[in-house]
Image: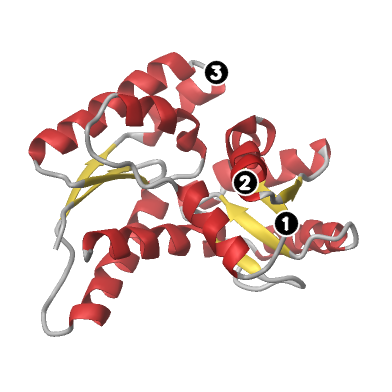
Amino acid sequence: MKTIGIIGGMSWESTIEYYKYINGEINKKLGGLHSAKMLIESYDFEEIEKLQSSEDWNTLTKILINSAQKLETAGADYIAISTNTMHLMAPEVQKNISIPLIHIAQATGNYIKNNNMNTVLLIGTRYTMTKPFYKDKLKNEFGINVILPSLSEQKIINDIIYDELCKGLIKENSKQKLLGIISEHKKEGAQAVILGCTELPNIVKTAEIPVINTTKIHCLEIVDRMLK
């Protein structure tokens, strides 16, 4: 078994899900008392969020590179960033380490194509929805058409993520707002919805169209690499 190095704490709510999924899948495949060989570098998300809000991506890039290098030095065979948003810095992180970074959008793109879909709705933090790093990867590498919510819908989604989900709060009225947004974009031809924030699967389990749980998809890819 290979060792996975996880960059987490963004937020800790989603990092918990990574720990559960990866260990659960390893045990399912190997049986007995098997669990994952894992190293975790976890951040105080308050500090990360302030840098995100101020758009200080240069500092955030340095932080992630430092984490990846520490995990590699500690013995990790692969690196995984346990958040969709911070994959904005993934190319720079990969350039500064000598082990593979397992990209969440790459795993998601493979899943979408394997399920014969070509038009999807992307919801997540405002950074994931508005910056090109995610949707361009899906379009350029997989030929997937990505539908984005309106600006007003993006604000609703972003507020639910940062004000509630990152704090472990699950509210029924927020769930209904998200389901309503998904339903609206089904009319535009969305064949599925990408839950492009690793906290979103905690509130959206099913919708009018198939739900693409990027957290689970990423973890399954991580486990496959660990057991190769």
Quick check: 9 left or right of 32? right
Residue 148: percent from left, percent from top: 76, 44
Gap between marks 1 and 3 measured at Cα: 27 Å
- Residue 180 picture quarter: bottom right
Q: Nearer the viewer, residue 217 or 205?
A: 217
Nearest-to-viewer mark from 1 and 2:
2
- Residue 186 picture quarter: bottom right
Residue positioned 69% across, 32% down in the render: 130
Nearest-to-viewer mark from 1 and 3:
1
For mark 1, what is the residue?
A: 120
Q: Amino acid at mark 3?
A: Glu
Determine the secondary structure under disc 2. Answer: helix
Quick check: 48 left or right of 159? left
Q: Is residue 77 above or below residue 216?
A: above
Q: Is residue 210 above or below residue 188?
A: below
Q: Amino acid at mark 2?
A: Leu
Residue sticking out furthest to the right: 187
Residue positioned 18% across, 79% down in the render: 30
Residue 78: which disc? none
The earlier-in-sequence mark between 1 and 2 is: 1
Residue positioned 39% across, 22% down in the render: 61
For mark 3, what is the residue?
A: 55
Quadrant placement of the N terminus: bottom left
The earlier-in-sequence mark between 1 and 3 is: 3
Residue 17: percent from left, percent from top: 37, 61
The reply to whether callout 2 and callout 3 are in contact (CB within 8 Å) is no
For mark 2, what is the residue?
A: 138
Residue 163: percent from left, percent from top: 57, 43
